[in-house]
């Protein structure tokens, strides 16, 4: 179920990026269908799933994430597990990501990177 969803995205995303973003079927799949399929596969009602093809335009790196609500419920805050696609769609990685939004609003990129390193190293 997860494999099929990820393969569908990887196989169709680059072509979709050449078309209008709006309510494109791949964008909708990333927002709704893929997260639902992952939620069903992991079968844990305490977790939240979400996906993003971008906001207002196609993302370079689309993703589908799993959030643990005591830590975070969105990709712009906290840390979370995420399926992250490569730009050319040749790879998808399951990784633990840290949101940089809280740091990037307050600091320059270099300072934000240093603050994250201080927090986790």
Image (spheres, helix red, strand yellow):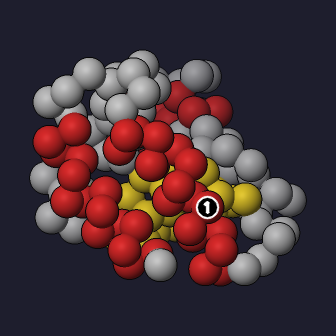
Residue 105 in sight: yes
Task: Point out the image quarter for the C terminus.
Answer: bottom right
Above or below, 43 against 113 in this view is below
**Whether residue 80 can be seen here:** no
**Residue appearing at x 76%, y 66% in the figure:** 47
Q: Position of residue 6 (x, y in %)?
A: 36, 67
The secondary element bearing badge 1 is classed as: helix
Q: Is residue 19 left or right of residue 72?
A: left
Q: Nearer the viewer, residue 106 or 12?
A: 12
Q: Position of residue 22 (x, y in %)?
A: 39, 22
Seen in the picture, residue 110 relative to 20 is either above or below; the reply is below
55 left or right, relative to 78: left
34 sits to left or right of 118: left
In-front residue for pair 106/40: 40
Count residues near mark 1 (Cα–Cα under 10 Å), then give few for <14, some for 14-19, many for 20+. some
Is residue 54 found left or right of 80 in the rendered image? left
Which residue is at the front of the view, 110 or 23? 23
Q: Residue 11 location, x and y as percent?
A: 19, 59
The location of residue 38, given as percent across then percent down, is 57, 70
Please tell me which residue is depicted at 24% across the width and 60% down the height of the picture. Answer: 10
Q: Residue at x 65, y 69 (%)?
A: 39
The residue beneath circle 1 is 36
Give the mark count. Answer: 1
């Amino acid at each position: 179920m997860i494999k099929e969803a990820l393969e569908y995205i990887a196989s169709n995303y680059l072509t979709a990026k050449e078309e209008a973003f709006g309510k494109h079927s791949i964008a909708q799949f990333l927002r709704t269908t893929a997260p639902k399929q992952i939620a069903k596969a992991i079968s844990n009602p305490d977790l939240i799933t979400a996906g993003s093809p971008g906001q207002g335009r196609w993302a370079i790196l689309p993703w589908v994430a799993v959030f643990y609500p005591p830590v975070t419920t969105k990709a712009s805050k906290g840390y979370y597990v995420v399926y992250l696609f490569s730009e050319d769609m040749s790879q998808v990685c399951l990784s633990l990501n840290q949101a940089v939004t809280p740091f990037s609003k307050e600091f320059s990129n270099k300072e934000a990177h240093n603050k994250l390193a201080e927090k986790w190293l």
